[in-house]
């Protein structure tokens, strides 16, 4: 702890010292980019060009605003370029020391090109660092070819996706994922399947928001990831068809269709995807139980064959009432069938007993789920100054049912014929409905660049979960199990916020906001006759300060407070048998966790990023393992830890080795500490860990593109557990033919079969270790055909309200 404190203190003092470096007197060139309809042109390249070449440059923000700060002098022209627009070049002017030049509103002329002839290639920076978020441009990059959206998310700054598809941001779980600025309302498992089914070629960019402002829901302690899909804004049709599959010992096909259409005032898009996710999970567990007469050992070998078949559809229709007002409808629909077959063999040694005991378990589980999400939205521009109002109404409904039969055979020594048999049958039916409504208003005020925002939101949730357990001995009838339970959950949340952003000086800008949320929660265990209620009101402040030290160096400070409410399933006091020795139960006494987050981000030349962050979470959710020495069984459940702390340092360093060889490199150092009373014992566990990732993109002759990514996670702790370090290497190659209409992609994962997880729990009376490998080594093959028809088109960069998020599972 002392070494870690010295390390982070030294880095903090160093960066604070750097921020006070005196900057030379600079010239400031600013302006606003709009298209011919008056809409902002974000993420355009803006440069000062002299007769000798590039002098300085920047990228316009999401509102089309740009600001170039430079200490250089000479005669220059302002040049603006963006995909789908004709390049703009100003009249030459003299750049003198301390010049303040306002270019005003620059109208960009759309580039009219025949659809059958155009090829869109990304010339923008792959990663754009903004004060409140990091934008990862995916469109036209190697990342988009032959990959799915979950793959791309896992390669983004500060993000790690574990083998279960759980997304970790800066060493923390609880990430909220949005699609086109609107909530997904999915469990972690459903979301992972959805993102695996969605081709990365369908998305334009990712927005990674470490510390969201008051405009966002306070839900989600780790941050927000917003997926922006491609969109057409000029009459025409474009899209793609893909087919392929993956082999990792099991064959899993994939296929999909994406279509974008615009005609007049109508704009629509549709994505249809099918994928199968197949894995073979090899799991070895060693458990030691300390008994009065000695130690009993359980050695368990399991193999789980799992296959999920998923069908997903999402689409949108938008109608332009006039130049200032739009109506839109979005929908998502999915259905999923999954099957898992588990075989497990356990050898049991007991002190003082000559012969060992054995347990042979087999289970078959089948599940089905259907989900529908619908969104109706309106956005309007109320004046020419930029005053906006946005309204959304959402509805989500999901039905899920599953059944699992666990068969067990127990015997001692060689007496297999006289073994005892039993069976456990689990039936689980669940549905939930979610209704939300919100309105957001923003208005420029006072000086140029200052904006006031406010809004209100309400959400109403109902979940009904019915768990039916029964047991049978030998070939006897199934008898009801007392752990069966019906659980009904209701949650109502009302929220309001206000925020203001403006400039303190030419070099300092800020944004401050406050969000208030009132929660009314009721959990009813119908079977047990128990009702748990929670009612609370919380305030969630947020502050952002951006310091532009020079034209090539800026510092962004931010701080906020967030909440994560327990997902509905974990509050259900169920008992679910994984095998006869291991069970999982719910916890109706779970309370929300609260986190206070601080971050200081240093950005050099718009590319190099060095970040210090600190987060402290009260009542943090954590999986707890409890062991019963008498029955020699293990139970897991989610409980509130007293406090967890996370301090992190992140460095992102892109290096262009050659014109055809570029790299993106990341180092992240995390210090985690977990403190909590667990039963009769007190946990105080701390460790410093690190994560290294190096991604290489190579453009080779004859149109071949290659991507190689290596990643290593050092040893780390997670609650009671200690996880050994592990790493892996992925690689992919793509080739486009037929005038870039057909792309062939081959991706290989875990080339050296090293993505093996080894972990141990040595706390109180628990002595358990396990090894897991989930057939990550595999090859994926994809064919993608792009089509386009119409007069002309360009890919739009617009984005929406950024309010929605989900909380069904973590």
Image (cartoon, helix red, strand yellow):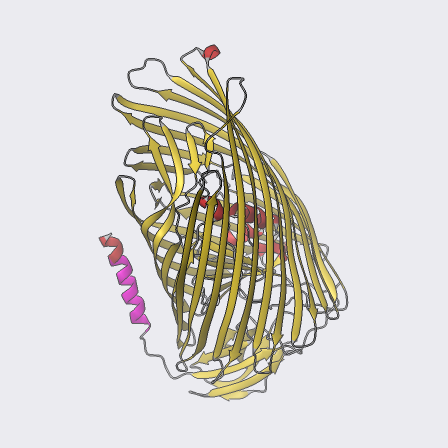
* Image point (73%, 67%), residue name: 266
Residue plotted at (70% across, 65% down): 267
User: Residue 647 appears at what percent x and percent y?
Assistant: 33, 56
Q: Position of residue 467 (x, y in %)?
A: 52, 37
On the rendered structure, is 100 left or right of 714? Answer: right
- Residue furthest left in the image: 2
Query: Quadrant location of residue 319?
Result: bottom right
Q: In the rendered picture of this protein, how many numbered marks are placed on residues?
A: 0
Q: How far from the left and from the top, in percent, is residue 688?
A: 31, 50
Specify whether residue 58 is in view: yes
Vertical placement of residue 787 versus 766, above or below: below
388 vs 729, nearest the viewer: 388
Q: Is residue 165 visible?
A: no
Quarter of the view holding residue 353:
top left
State the extent of the magenta-drawn residues as a range: 6-19
Image quarter of residue 318: bottom right
Q: Is residue 301 above or below residue 85?
A: above
Q: Is residue 9 magenta?
A: yes
**In x, y percent, where is residue 675?**
29, 48
Does the magenta segment cover residue 163?
A: no
Identity of the residue drawn at 44% across and 84% down: 27
- Our reading of the magenta stretch's main secondary structure is helix
Report whether 64 appears left or right of 594.
right
Residue nearest the viewer, comparing 301 with 563: 563
Residue that appears at 67% across and 78% down: 36
């Amino acid at each position: 702890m002392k070494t870690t404190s010295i390390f982070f203190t030294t880095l903090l003092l160093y960066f604070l010292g750097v921020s006070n470096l005196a900057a030379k007197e600079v010239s400031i060139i600013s302006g606003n980019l709009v298209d011919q309809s008056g809409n902002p042109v974000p993420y355009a390249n803006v440069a000062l060009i002299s007769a000798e070449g590039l002098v300085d440059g920047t990228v316009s923000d999401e509102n089309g605003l740009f600001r170039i700060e430079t200490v250089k002098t000479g005669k220059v022209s302002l040049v603006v370029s963006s995909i789908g627009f004709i390049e703009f070049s100003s009249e030459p002017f003299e750049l003198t020391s301390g010049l303040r030049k306002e270019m005003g509103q620059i109208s960009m002329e759309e580039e009219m090109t025949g659809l059958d002839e155009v090829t869109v290639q990304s010339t923008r920076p792959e990663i754009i660092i903004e004060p409140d978020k990091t934008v990862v441009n995916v469109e036209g990059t190697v990342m988009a070819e032959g990959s799915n959206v979950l793959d791309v998310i896992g390669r983004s700054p500060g993000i790690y996706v574990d083998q279960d598809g759980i997304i970790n941001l800066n060493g923390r779980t609880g990430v909220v994922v949005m699609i086109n600025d609107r909530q997904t309302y999915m469990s972690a498992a459903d979301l992972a399947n959805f993102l695996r089914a969605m081709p990365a070629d369908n998305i334009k960019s990712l927005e990674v928001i470490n510390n969201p402002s008051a405009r966002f829901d306070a839900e989600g302690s780790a941050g927000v990831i917003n997926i922006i899909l491609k969109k057409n804004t000029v009459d025409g049709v474009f899209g793609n068809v893909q087919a392929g599959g993956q082999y990792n010992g099991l064959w899993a096909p994939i296929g999909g269709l994406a279509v974008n259409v615009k005609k007049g005032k109508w704009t629509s898009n549709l994505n249809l995807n099918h994928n199968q996710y197949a894995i073979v999970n090899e799991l070895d567990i060693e458990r030691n139980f300390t008994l009065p007469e000695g130690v009993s050992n359980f050695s368990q070998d399991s193999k789980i064959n799992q296959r999920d078949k998923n069908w997903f559809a999402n689409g949108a229709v938008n109608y332009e009432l006039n130049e200032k007002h739009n109506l839109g409808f979005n929908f998502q629909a999915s259905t999923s069938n999954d099957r898992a077959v588990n075989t497990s063999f356990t050898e049991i040694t007991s002190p003082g007993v000559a012969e060992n005991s054995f347990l042979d378990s087999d289970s078959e589980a089948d599940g089905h789920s259907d989900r529908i999400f619908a969104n109706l939205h309106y956005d309007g521009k109320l004046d020419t100054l930029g005053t906006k109002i946005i309204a959304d109404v959402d509805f989500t409904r999901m039905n899920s049912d599953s059944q699992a039969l666990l068969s067990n055979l127990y015997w001692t020594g060689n007496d297999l014929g006289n073994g005892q048999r039993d069976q456990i049958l689990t039936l689980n039916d669940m549905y939930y409905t979610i209704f939300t409504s919100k309105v957001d208003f923003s208005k420029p005020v006072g000086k140029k660049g200052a904006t006031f925002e406010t809004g209100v939101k309400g959400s109403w949730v109902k979940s009904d979960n019915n768990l039916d357990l029964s047991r049978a001995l030998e070939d006897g009838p199934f008898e009801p199990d007392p752990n069966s339970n019906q659980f009904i959950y209701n949650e109502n949340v009302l929220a309001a916020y206000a925020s203001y952003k403006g400039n303190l000086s030419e070099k300092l800008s800020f944004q401050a906001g406050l969000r208030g949320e009132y929660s009314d929660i009721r959990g009813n265990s119908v079977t047990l006759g128990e009702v748990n209620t929670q009612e609370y009101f919380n305030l969630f402040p947020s502050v952002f300060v951006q310091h532009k030290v020079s034209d090539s160096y800026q510092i962004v400070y931010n701080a906020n407070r967030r909440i994560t409410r327990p997902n509905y399933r974990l509050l259900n006091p169920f008992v679910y048998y994984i095998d006869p020795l291991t069970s999982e139960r719910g916890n109706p006494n779970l309370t929300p966790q609260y986190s206070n987050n601080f971050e200081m981000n240093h950005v050099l030349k718009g590319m190099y990023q060095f970040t210090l962050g600190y987060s402290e979470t009260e009542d943090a959710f954590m999986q707890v393992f409890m062991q019963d020495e008498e029955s020699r069984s293990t139970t897991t459940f989610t409980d509130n830890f007293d406090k967890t702390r996370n301090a992190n340092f992140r460095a992102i360093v892109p290096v262009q080795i050659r014109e055809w060889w570029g790299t993106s490199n990341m180092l992240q150092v995390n210090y985690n500490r977990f403190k909590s009373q667990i039963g009769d014992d007190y946990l105080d566990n701390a460790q410093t860990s690190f994560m290294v990732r190096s991604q290489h993109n190579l453009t080779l002759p004859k149109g071949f593109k290659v991507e190689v990514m290596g990643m290593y996670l050092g040893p780390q702790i997670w609650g009671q557990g200690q996880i050994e370090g592990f790493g892996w290497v992925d690689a992919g190659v793509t080739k486009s033919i037929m005038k870039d209409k057909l792309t062939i992609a081959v991706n290989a994962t875990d080339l050296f079969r090293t993505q093996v997880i080894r972990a141990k729990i040595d706390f109180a009376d628990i002595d358990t270790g396990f090894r897991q490998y989930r057939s990550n080594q595999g090859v994926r093959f994809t064919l993608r055909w792009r089509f386009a028809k119409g007069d002309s088109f360009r890919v739009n960069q617009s984005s929406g309200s950024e309010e929605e998020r989900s909380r069904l599972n973590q």
